[in-house]
């Protein structure tokens, strides 16, 4: 599998969501674009695609763990920015 432009853009959007979460503070009242549980279910595909394309997944692997942790904390129906809650825990 080769990373697609959409997956690369998606990673950029995740970073933007985390930055917004830290700037907004602890609230989780922002609109949900894509539930975190759905993203967690598919995140392994990004890691697999990186490996298949001989791209290091050094940043993706810990991010996958943070996403799973945020879902386990009850943030599965929140947006990706809820991962900031896992970083604070």
Image (cartoon, rainbow, N blue to C red):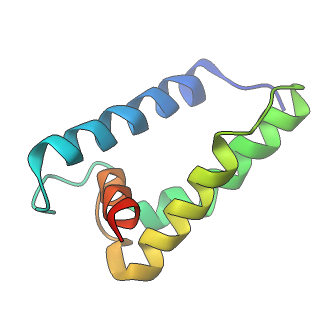
Residue shown at 30%/51% (left/top)? Answer: 81
Work out whether residue 64 or residue 10 is closer to the camera in this orientation and state it.
Answer: 64
Which residue shows up at 21% across the image and 39% down it? Answer: 20
Q: Residue at left 72%, top 48%?
A: 45
Residue 72: image location, x then y, percent: 47, 81
Using the rendered view, name the quadrant where residue 12 is placed: top left
Image quadrant occupied by the C terminus: bottom left
Residue 53 against residue 27 in the figure, above or below: above
Q: Residue furthest top?
A: 5
Q: Residue at x 32, y 64 (%)?
A: 88
31 vs 38: above or below: above
Left or right: residue 78 compared with residue 10: left
Q: Looking at this rendering, what residue extends furthest in the front direction?
A: 88
- Taking depth in this image into account, of 2 and 61 the one nearest to the observer is 61
In the picture, the quarter occupied by the N terminus is: top right
Please tell me how many numbered marks the rendered image carries.
0
Instruction: Left or right? Give the position of 38 relative to 88.
Output: right
Residue 84 in the image: state x and y as whole percent. 33, 56
Side of 59 where 21 appears, left or right: left
Please tell me whether residue 74 is drawn above or below residue 58 in the rendered image: below
Location of residue 46 with respect to 86 vertically, above or below = above
Give percent across and percent down for residue 52.
Answer: 90, 33
């Amino acid at each position: 599998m080769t990373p697609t432009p959409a997956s690369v853009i998606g990673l950029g959007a995740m970073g933007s969501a985390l930055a917004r979460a830290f700037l907004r503070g602890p609230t989780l009242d922002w609109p949900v674009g894509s539930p975190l549980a759905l993203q967690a279910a598919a995140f392994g595909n990004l890691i697999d695609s990186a490996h298949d394309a001989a791209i290091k997944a050094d940043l993706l692997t810990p991010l996958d763990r943070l996403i799973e942790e945020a879902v386990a904390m009850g943030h599965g129906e929140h947006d990706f920015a809820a991962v900031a809650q896992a970083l604070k825990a």
